[in-house]
Amino acid sequence: MDRRDFLRNTCQACAALALIPVAASLEGCASGARMLAVENGVLSVPMDTLGKGSTAVVAGQGLANKLMIVKRADGSYTALELICPHKGGPLKEHGDGLECDWHHSRFDLEGKVLNGPAKSDLKSYPVEADGKMLRVRVG
């Protein structure tokens, strides 16, 4: 390999490696989770994050897992951690509930186990409505 081929191949490899973080950050955006700040153990979520629906997926800086904010029929809210208590698999919306990608445990939007192998409910956090903000106590 001559010097010109070496430099061209090296530059192509560097350019390809430079694209990896961009692809990873785009994948994070595509997940639909909105990254928010946690201050004094409280995650502040704008109510318009829910849009016209009754759920929204958010991520908090410093939180290990994404949360799903759920607006209940009575107008109250809850926040569910999107991690399966069985083996730590990720949860995704499936029908009118949540399902684990790994072993297919199913949960309702209150976090209750519908079918296993999971035996315990999802971790949930209290949510208070405060004007146009929802305050999730995460710490």
Image: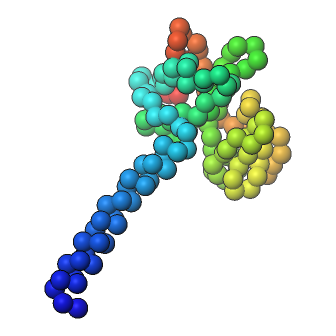
Q: Quadrant of residue 13?
A: bottom left
Instruction: From the viewer's side, name the closer residue of 67 and 14.
Output: 14
Q: Residue furthest top?
A: 131
- Examine the image and state in which quarter residue 57 appears: top right
Identify whether 134 is placed above or below 60.
above
Q: Hey, which residue is sitting farthest left in the picture? A: 3
Residue 126 visible at all: no
- Measuring 74% from the left and 56% from the top, which residue is drawn there? 103
Where is residue 60 drawn, in percent x and y? 47, 33
Q: How is the image coloured?
A: rainbow
Position above or below: 9 against 120: below
**Outermost residue toward the bottom?**
1
Residue shown at the point (45%, 48%) measured from the top left: 26
Q: Residue at x 83, y 40 (%)?
A: 114
Residue at x-position 61% and y-position 30% = 56
Depth order, front residue of 126/46: 46
Q: Is residue 59 visible?
A: yes
Q: Does 49 sit left or right of 2 as displayed?
A: right
In the displayed structure image, the side of residue 112 where residue 24 appears, left or right: left
Say if 101 sits above or below 139 in the image.
below
The image quarter in which residue 17 lies: bottom left
Q: Pinpoint residue 11: horizontal percent, then vertical percent.
A: 24, 71
Q: Quadrant of the N terminus?
A: bottom left
Q: Position of residue 4 (x, y in %)?
A: 18, 83
The percent coordinates of residue 87 (x first, y second) are: 67, 53
Across the whole image, how many numbered discs are drawn on residues?
Answer: 0
